[in-house]
Image (spheres, helix red, strand yellow):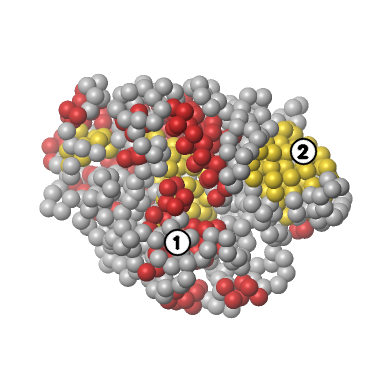
Amino acid sequence: MERGQTVGIRPSKRRSTDCPDFPRSDGHQVVTARGPRGPSMGAARRERPPTDGDCGPANSGRGTCRRLTAGGATVRQERTPPWPNPHGQTATEDTFRHQNRPELRTLLTWTGGRVRRPLRGTTERGTPSTGTAVPRPHLPTEADMASRTGVGRPFRSPLGRRAVLATLAAAGTTALAPLPARASVPPTDPPAPRQMRGLWIASVANIDWPSRTGLDPAAQRAEFNRLADEALEWGFNALFVQIRPTADAFWPSTLEPWSQWISGRQGQDPGYDPLDFMVETAHARGLAFHAWFNPYRVSMQPDPAALVPEHPARVHPEWTVSYGGKLYYDPGVPAARRFCQEAMLDAVRRYDIDGVHFDDYFYPYPVAGSDFPDDATFRSYGAGFENKAAWRRHNVDLMVSEMRDAVRAARPHALFGISPFGVWRNATTDPLGSRTSAFQSYDGLHADTRGWARQGWLDYIAPQVYWHIGLPVADYAVLAPWWADVVRGTDTQLWIGQAVYKSGAPGQPAPWQDGRELTRHLTLNATLPEVAGDLFFSAKDVRADRVGDFASMRLAHWRTPVLGPLPARLDSGPLPRRPRVRVRRDAGAQGTATLTISSDPTGHGPHPFRYAVYRLPDRPGRRPDARDAVLVAVVPGGSRTVYTDSAAPEGCWYVVSAVDRVQREGRPSHPAR
């Protein structure tokens, strides 16, 4: 997944990475229970094994709530080491900011501290979770949105989805003026109460972090601190960081050498534990950390002799294959597969990550005129398979299913998911395929991505739908609904990979030059209840935002805070502790309320990872009417957090709930004003 641009079969070289010229992308936890110790910004530290008290598997279902959001203010998070203010101002060691956001009403169902959840067999939005097709909500036009009335009431457009797709397709081929980063954009319908907003951070070839080899530990830490601060400012709630790009490690692995991309030379100790540092840095800001692994790739060059002498690929040359100018572990060799799994599980077992993430690389992208040289392996291990293609798919299936089982055994709360190439098969090849004419991952990479989602092997699937609306051979407006159909009726969540790197890039077609393509994508996603979020490739391109595409999308679709996704299998277990809240009104600052939020030290359940702050218009009474509540902020958790609401109406009340690592939400606090 390290970058690509056109739809086809023949790979092209780009930026000295291994990215075929396909429409793809280029190229995380130790919360210390939020105790008195903040994240270590220097010394390496190993993670203790997880306990049920941290975020164990099971839950009682007390006091969850559903909501839609709004608001903004200044937040002060105590006990944490210094980091820069996201707005570029000098900040104290316990300060960061959230941008102001307009209010939207929320739909919650608090009843005496309990929550009425959607009935079994329905989604969060109340639509059937069976394979039955359901009507999708209409999509408002920008004119509709500008004329809507009522705070937080979603406008329902008279347009059907077919008309919406036609409108978006036309927009995708019409040049529009770029939107300034701070322009006012009418909000779309309120987002789902829970949404993945993920950022890819690639390390191979120093794409995102570290920015170059040879940086000392202090410089590397400073760069990652800046990335994490910016991710928080931009509205992300999860980082997907590449920690094993080429059969090497961003942690002191017992099985593989230090990565050349961290120290500049393979096997050289960087002088600290980058993975431990990154996990703590993310968690201190309330960001989930997903560890991104490449299973089979050994080196960006083909010669095993170029590896350090102790590299497993040199010790076991029978495991490796040179192909297309790179070196790979052969997926058909059982011993190689088991070694790759153990190499990845070393990090899963030792570090408190939130997820294990694979991208689109399984068998390599094909090189024109050359087949992957595994004839001897097929003769040795392919008995019982009618052809090599079926055997190769079986090998990849084993890697995926076995890793799913191993990850859940080692770290039950961690998610396991894959971000595959955006096309499974074309309908001309398979009637179950999409109406596309593109490269097919099922046949080219031997990755049955549709099957993995349908069989429940994944917590989520995040297809890289890196094409614009209206592209004839691979239309986003065709593929997003196709993937929604794939996950419908399953427990596999759908997040969609977005190609920020194409926005404003030279050589990209007109839809990627007008600064509105990402907005069009998420507008279409809003008509598909199955789409539970997006991942954006990659960090440096989000930072550059050459034509304001990402900024426009944020203004249109990310104006309100949300909680992260909660897979069905984790929606049970001990809930986080009920927080306590005190509110202080500043007489000298009209419309300002300062909340001091603390975790009950005598309570049971996991320590808070985040706090969800709700505002109510007046005294709620013993049984708050949650229909009037507004989620104004989601802030990092801790034993004590201070949040300042700079848009507090006179007479409003607040309740706060704690959110744990897997995004389970506990009982709301007692109301305070």
Relative horizontal placement of residue 454, taking residue 424 as reference (left or right): right
Kindly identify which numbered label has been placed on residue 547: 1
The x and y percentages for residue 430 are: 29, 63
Q: Is residue 670 visible?
A: no
The x and y percentages for residue 110 are: 76, 50
> What's the residue at 59%, 47% (across, down)?
87
Total residue callouts: 2
Give the foreground label among 2 and 1. 1
Question: Is 14 in front, or is 358?
Answer: 14
As measured in the structure, the alpha-carbon distance from the residue carrying label 2 to the one carrying label 1 is 40 Å
> What's the residue at 15%, 53% (across, down)?
368
Question: Are the two marked residues, 2 and 1, in contact with CB atoms closer than 8 angstroms?
Answer: no
**Which residue type carries mark 2?**
Thr
Q: Residue furthest front?
A: 90
Secondary structure under tag 1 reads: loop
The x and y percentages for residue 640 are: 72, 33
Label whose residue precedes the other's in the sequence (2 or 1)? 1
Relative horizontal placement of residue 236, taking residue 480 as reference (left or right): right
Relative horizontal placement of residue 64, taking residue 426 as reference (left or right): right
Q: Which residue is mark 2?
A: 596
**Which residue type carries mark 1?**
Val
Question: Is 662 in front, or is 384?
Answer: 662
